[in-house]
Amino acid sequence: MSNFCPEWIYGICAAKTSFDFLNTNNTLTIISKKFAVGLSENYNEIKTEEIEVLSQKILEFLSEINASDQAIEIINDYIYSRTNFSSNGNERKLSGMFSSAFDGEKIKDYSVEKSLKIFKANIYSIRNGIMEKSTPGWSILDKEDIGWLGELFEKEIDIF
């Protein structure tokens, strides 16, 4: 049975890769590998390159819109938005009686192109006040029932 990573999780992991790249001295490849390994423990294999390419495109987009010193805040707002709200704007329920937002998909519903398009649309919605921004100091660990995904976000980079 197929167990593909949900697009929203793939998207926020690539965004967090960009966030960590801007905040640390680690390379995109090393950070991408952390997320690829972590996601592959829960879903069908995700290649490091799939995370790295989307992360690079996110950084390029932020450069195009001259995000400069606001890039970190913009990425965090995106992660907040995607974690807390589904694509239709309803609140995302991470766990439920019969299903979970973490459940794998039957078909691969993510790609660099699709996730980049969602990232751009989400950022424009946040900038135009259609979607709310994260509160100052917000972390994914603030989200109830975030579980293993929060742990992956906070996991230290294994250089070896």
Image (spheres, grey):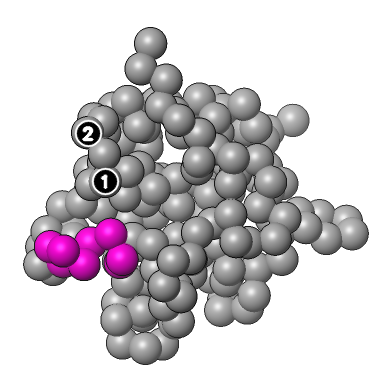
- Identified by mark 2, the residue type is Asn
| Residue 149 occupies quadrant | top right
Quarter of the image that includes the C terminus: top left
- Tag 2's secondary structure? loop
Q: Residues within 10 Å of mark 2 (few under 14, many from 20)?
A: few
Q: Quick one: which residue is furthest to the bottom in this view?
A: 129
Callouts 1 and 2 close, C-beta under 8 Å:
no
Q: CA distance from mark 1 to mark 2?
A: 7 Å
Can residue 88 be seen here? The reply is yes
Q: Is residue 77 above or below residue 44?
A: below
In percent of width and height, residue 119 lies at 35, 62
In percent of width and height, residue 12 lies at 45, 52
* Residue at figure coordinates x 21%, y 67% from the top left: 70
* Residue at figure coordinates x 20%, y 51% from the top left: 59
In percent of width and height, residue 32 lies at 36, 32
Q: Tell whether 77 sits left or right of 37.
A: left
Q: Quick one: which residue is furthest to the front in this view?
A: 137
Quarter of the image that includes the N terminus: top right
Q: Is residue 87 above or below residue 4?
A: below
Q: Tell whether 12 sits left or right of 31.
A: right
The prevailing secondary structure element of the residues shown in magenta is helix
* Residue at figure coordinates x 50%, y 59% from the top left: 139
- Identified by mark 1, the residue type is Asn
The dot on residue 23 is 1
**Residue where numbered disc 2 is placed:** 25
* Residue at figure coordinates x 55%, y 62% from the top left: 83
Can residue 54 be seen here? The reply is no
Q: Is residue 73 magenta?
A: yes
Report the span colored magenta.
Answer: 67-74
- Tag 1's secondary structure? helix
